[in-house]
Structures are given as C-alpha cells and as structure tokens.
Amino acid sequence: MEIVIPPPLISFLTLRLGQVSKTLSREAGLEATYGIAGLDTLQLYQDFVTEFQIETPADWNLSRHITSERLQPLHSLRQLFSTRYRITNSYIDLTLGNLADMLEAGIWLAP
C-alpha cells in the first residue's frame, strides 16, 4: 500500500512554496528538496501549526529545524569539537512525511 501525502498538506505547501507535485514523497526534506531555510522555515512551521491546529509542546524547540541565514563561527567550532553539542544541536530537516504524521496526529511530533 502506497503512503501518500494528504491533499490538505499538498494544498498548504503549494500555496506557500509554489509547484511541489513533482517531488511529492514522504522523504522529501523541506530544505533539501524545496530550498526553504531560515525565517521562511519559521514562518512555514508557524503557519502549519496555526492552519491545521497542531498542538505544540511547552518545550517546542524549532531551532533544530531551522538553518541560520548568517555565519555563526562559535556554533561551527562547537559542532566540530564537541560530540555532545553535535548531538543536542544537530539540524533536522523535516520531511513531508513528518508533516503528514503531525497532521494526522494533531500534535507536533519530534522526528
């Protein structure tokens, strides 16, 4: 059985990102596939939780899902030299599958 992306999510993404149908798969990452980053990512996530009434946890940490649009030398050094920092601060590119699962559950799910 093929797992598809829900039509409401397709409409939401098409409205905000333009043509997305050629790359519709659960594995398509928002940054890797569609090139969305920085404040655009933040706005997309906020619109997503608002439009679909997704419940967010009290400790909702979006920083792991948003790449910075500016140079961060201290962050880069920590990433290079600290395993613990890499584990707790590594970037996670959310996929369409992640968003589809959240849409179905009605709650923000950590990937």
Image (spheres, helix red, strand yellow):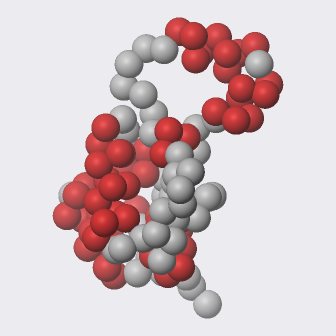
* Residue 37 in view: yes
Relative to 10, 95 lies left or right: right
Residue placed farthest to the right in the image?
83
Instruction: Confirm whether residue 26 shows in the render.
Output: no
Residue 85: horizontal and vertical position, in percent? 72, 26
**Does 93 sit above or below residue 25?**
above
Residue drawn at (48%, 62%), measured in percent from left and top? Answer: 56
Q: Position of residue 111 (x, y in %)?
A: 63, 58
Quadrant assignment, res 31? top left
Q: Above or below — where is 31 with respect to 106?
A: above
Residue at left offset 80%, top offset 25%: 83
Is residue 17 depicted above or below 42 in this figure? below
Q: Name the outermost residue toward the bottom.
A: 1
Count the marks.
Answer: 0
Image x and y of residue 74, in percent: 57, 10
Residue at 24% x, 65% y: name it: 14
Nearest the viewer among 64 and 24 is 64
Q: Is residue 41 left or right of residue 16?
A: right
**Quadrant of the rendering where the N terminus is positioned:** bottom right
Give the percent coordinates (x, y) of residue 104: 50, 81
22 left or right of 29 in image: left
Q: Residue at x 36, y 73 (%)?
A: 53
